[in-house]
Every structure is written in C-alpha cells, then in structure tokens.
Amino acid sequence: MRKFYLTTPLYYPNARPHVGNSYTTVVCDAIARYKRLCGYDVAYLTGTDEHGEKLERAAGQAGVAPQAFVASKREVFYELWKALNISYTHFIFTDLPDHVRSVQRMLIRARDAGYIEKRRYQGRYCVSCELYVSESTEPADCPICGRPAEIMEEENYFFRLRKFQEKLLTHYAEHPKFVQPDFRFNEVKNFVQSGLRDISVSRKRIKWGIPWPGDTEQVFYVWYDALTGYLTGIGFAEGDNGNPEFQKYWPADLHMVGKDIIRFHAVYWPAFLMAASLPLPETIFAHGWLTVGADKMSKSKGNVVYCEPIVEVLGADALRYHLLRDIPFGQDSSFSYEGLIQRFNSDLANDLGNLANRTVTMVNRYFAGEVPVAEKPTPAELEIAELAGKTLQDFRVRFDFYDFSRALDGAWQFIGRVNKYLVETEPWALAEAGLEANKTRLANILYTAAEAVRFSAVMLYPVIPESAERLWRQLGQKAKLEDQRLDDLRWGGLKTGTRVSKPEIIFPRLEKEATLKKLWELEDAERAPATTRKESAKHVEPQLQSGGQPQAEPQRISIEDFAKVDMRVGEVKAAELVPGAQKLLKLSVDIGSEVRQVVAGIAEYYQAEQLIGMKVVLVVNLQRRKLRGIESNGMIVAATVGEEGRPVLVTFKEDVPNGARLK
Ligand code: MSP
C-alpha cells in the first residue's frame, strides 16, 4: 500500500486557534481524507510547539509554570480539532520525553558531522516569531511580523548553515516541486542565493526548552526543536533504523505551512536534515493568509474570528467547504461571515441540499422508498453518466495539485447539471399526470438523481465529511463511506432496490441577518473576559511550591517596556450603542490633540448618556481594529471586577486636562 505522510505546522499554544491558523489543519484534513479514498496509508501529524521564549513569557505573565501552562492550552487544540472533524493520526507536543530524545539525537548527528560550533551571538531577535533577525545591535524590525526586534547577546551553539548553501541549491534544482507554489519557490531560491548566515541553535537566557546535550546552561533554539517534531511523531526517538513506523512514513510527502514560515521549512529544515544524514521531505507547500479586509487575521491585530461560533451556528462542514471553495489555494483571501453564509446558501443549501432532499423525498413518495430500476437511458441521462466520470477525473487531478477551489467548482457544475435535468424532466409533474403511466420514465429520472447524490457524497467526503456521511446514509448505503475508493467509484454503482431513509434536511437555508446576529452574539461571548467564558473551567491555578508561594512569579517588564504604552486622559464627548450589538458602545473621546473614535464592550454596564463628559483613560497607541465593521482607534482602560468580569472605568477625582499622559 502506498503511504502518504503529511503535517501541519506545530502551533504555538499561547493563544487559542482562530479561523486563520485552523485553515492549515482543515486543508490538511481534506487532503488526508482524499488520499485515503485514493487508497493511501495516510499518516497525518499535527501538534503544538511548546518551548521557547514566547511561551516562557506567556506562562510568566499568567503566573503559571510553563509546563502546566502549555499542558492546559494544548487541550483547546484537541477540542477544536474534534469539533472540526480533523482526522489526524498523530498529535505531537514538544514537551514529550520522546521528543527530547529525538531532538538530541538529531543534534548529536549534526555535531558528529562537524556542523555545530560554539560562538558568541550579538544581534536582534524577534520573540514573537522566534527568529534571529540580524547580527548587529542596530535597531531592526522582524522581516516576518514587522515588530521591532530585541537586542540579544549570548554565547550559543551555531549551526553551520553556510555550508549548506550549495547543497540546498542543488536540491532545489533537482526537485522542481520541492517548494510550491512556484513563486514561493523563487523567493526561497533567491534568499539562499543571496547568501546564508550560520544560525544559533541554542539559547542561554531562557530555561524553557530542551536541554542541550553536554551543556546544562543551554537549551535548544525553539525552531530546531519544533521542526524535529515531524520526526518524533513517527517514532524517531527510537532511531531511524529498524523502526517500522519511521521507515514506513519518512520522508514526509507534504509539509503544509503558511507563507510566513516558509524560510524555516524550506531552508533551515532541509539543512538540519542533511546535517543528520536524513532524507528530505517531498514537498513544502506555503499557503497564503486569511485576512480581514487587508490585514492578516491574527491575535496581535485584534481581528481574529474563532471557529467555535461558526461550528455552533452553521456546522463544521460549512466552514470547511467555504475555506476550500472560496480561497484560491496559495493566495491571501479575505474572510467574512457574509461570504460564508452566502456560500452556504447557494452551494450547500440550494444546490446539493435541494438535490438530495427532493430526490430522497420522491423515491419515498413514488417508489415506496426503494431505488428504482433504470432502463433505456435518454441522451440526457447518458450525458450525465459521462459527466460524472469526467468530473471525478478532473476533481482528482485538481485535488492532486492542491487546487481545491477548482476541484469543487467542477463538482458543483456536475450537481448543477443534475439539478437542471430535474427541472427539465419535471418528475413531480410526471407523477401528477399519472404515476403508473409514467413509472418507467420516473424510475430513470430518480435513479439518475439518486446516483448523482451517491457519487457526489463519495467525491465530497474529504471536504464535508459529516454531511457526506448523512447523504450516504439517507441513500441507504451500509458500507463505510471512508472505506470507499475513488478508483472503484463508477456511475451505476447504486443498487436497485436499496431502501432509502426518510428525507432529512442537511443544510437548512440560512436567514442572513438572523445568522449574522447569532454569530456576533457568540463572538462577543468568546471575546468576553476569560473568567466568563467556558475556557474558565480550564483556567490553570498557579502551581504552589511547598512553601505555598506561586512557582513562577509573573514576568517583570522594564520601565522602557511600560513606556511603550501611551495612556492619555480623555473626555467622552459622544456615546451611542453600536446597532445590532448589545454589548458595544461607540464613543468619541477628546484627547486634547484630537477626538478619537473608540468602540468599547461596556454597554451592558454603562448607559451612553451617563458617559458624556466623563474623564477616562485611553490607550492611544494601540493598533486600530474593527468591531462590527466600526473602527476602534484606542482602548478605554477599565478594571475587571467580580466573577462575571464587570468593567469599571478608570477615572479621576481631580480635574485633569485632556491629553495628559499617565506614567
Ligand atoms: N510554531 C510555529 C510553527 C512550527 S512548525 C515546526 C508557528 N506557529 S503559529 O501558531 O504561529 O502558526 C502556525 C501556522 O498558522 C503558520 O503556518 C501560520 O502561517 C498559520 N497562520 C496564522 N495565522 C494565519 C492566517 N491569518 N491565515 C492563514 N494562516 C495563518 O509558526
């Protein structure tokens, strides 16, 4: 049996996954299910990347030991992947004892081959992307996220990346599909051609990492550690020889990543593997970003959309279908609830849902629930039979090229053709004109329609697994859908006499405004303080040492860090409720130099009129964000009080001028 090993990136568990980073996991799930239908033995690995400075700081801020912090956050991923029907076979988290062995094994091999040496690092580091940005202390911004990088000076172990420049370029030349899409491959080649610097692969000033073999003062650089997770997950800790799982699955067939982390995967990772004499993955595919408007969807931009409300209101398949259907794979694409609802109504409710529903209804009504015999097909029926085969063929070619949008477009043209055929043949009118007299015609029509639904259910299973399963069961199919093989999928496979079940509406048409309102309400609840959300149940208590003191003191920041937050006194000049939102007020706040528009989630606790003239504190240098389509340019400071997280606005007893700075 041919194997297929694919991976998602290992996610940082410091923040909850949102639609943006769930995208990779959804896409990989569709590929994994598709490959299984093609007869592959699939290993699908995902997981969490739990070490490094970013996580150490986040745990410190939460007042929790890093290990307990990551363990609690990891749970959110398991839950979400379950809700989205992700059929991963391996989940690796980097705080696993096996992973420690596997990373150390990699390193020892690279060190024995002469690719590691100790040197001093002096330069700029981006903690958010865990990237060494430059080798000079001159101010520099991170090339990935654009944030100012921090100064770092340490004695570290270096990986001699420079030695791999030629080897990488040769590999790229010999493997034209190593990085996809092609325009990303060109970026990678240009980066390598312009010259590589050796990179530090250990850290001294942090403790939260995998211990460096033979040096208790150092831990591994988090990217060296995390990338090796792709090996650990399939048993590399046990070694690469004589380990059946590792031998079966490595090298990976596909590492799916977002475009921002292509350098780590297409340059560093192959070099680390070469240094350890391990074969390289087949393909690294870098997809684009989900944006909100023009901005990347990300927690730091404050514009994230979470999957949970969507799953609750529309179901996981609606989200999966929209992501695969509407985003040209590889490109950036803007996400909106409106787009999601529109796609749901047009494709799932109208086209596929209607086809299935009326077909099953008519088989029940006119043939006592049994799939009828089809005889002497008309030219239209022959054409549909042929189109089915052609559609499947194209679908497979496009899926193999990761062109999901066009694959689905083709499938929907087929569904559209069958719907048109029903409109043309009007089986309901034939039945009314005389059920017995028209029985043969009706049998042909309903067999064609039912077979089209069965055919579509198998083909669409990778994308909408739960709904495809329901369609399959409605058609009375007893075999497991996941065990079907696309190689065996042929027109005419539906057996005459099969008993269909009662019709069941799988995709009820959505009323746009009511659905938006429900989504917004749930979204507001998701954004509410952690103590009021369901996440509160998972809130980790600070771990107590025997003396009763929290183990990890919240990390302290320097006065310079504090000075980065620009807080000003402002006076509320106008306030009104945001239409359709129960919790949001739109405020105009005079901060001396200008009047700012701010959206604040305080409407449940403050009346608009009560705020006019009130002096408040505004964070004025926060990134702008949009709430319900309204721009918020700043944030009002409030204390969070009580179990339900009631906001109490900060104000002053003395008169203070607008614009005065808080220090
Ligand atoms: N921990 C590293 C990966 C290590 S892999 C050995 C990391 N984690 S991450 O959580 O920051 O990002 C994980 C993935 O989510 C990346 O591929 C990133 O591109 C993707 N996305 C994050 N936001 C995204 C969008 N808004 N849109 C699409 N993908 C996005 O990097």
Image (cartoon, rainbow, N blue to C red):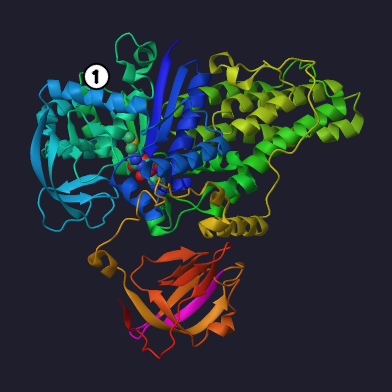
- In the image, residue 611 sits, relative to residue 633, either above or below, namely below
Q: Amino acid at mark 1?
A: Leu
Asked if the magenta segment contains residue 588, the reply would be yes
- In the image, residue 525 sits, relative to residue 322, either above or below, namely below
Residue 654 placement, left or right of 143 = right
On the image, which quarter does residue 177 sit in? top left
Q: Is residue 210 visible?
A: yes
The percent coordinates of residue 132 (x first, y second) are 19, 45
Asked if the magenta segment contains residue 96, the reply would be no
Range of magenta residues: 584-595
- In the image, residue 475 sits, relative to residue 492, either above or below, namely below
Residue 462 placement, left or right of 98 = right
* Number of other residues with Cα within 10 Å of mark 1, as a class: few under 14, some 14 to 19, many 20 or more: some
In the rendered image, the quadrant that contains the C terminus is: bottom left
Name the residue at 9% across, 51% down.
136
Name the residue at 46% across, 47% down.
16
Q: Which residue is mark 1?
A: 278
On the image, which quarter does residue 646 sit in? bottom right
Question: Label 1's element?
Answer: loop
The percent coordinates of residue 175 (x first, y second) are 24, 23
**In-front residue for pair 246/315:** 246
The percent coordinates of residue 240 (x first, y second) are 29, 14
- In the image, residue 493 sits, relative to residue 254, either above or below, namely above
| Residue, far front | 547
In the rendered image, the quadrant that contains the N terminus is: top left
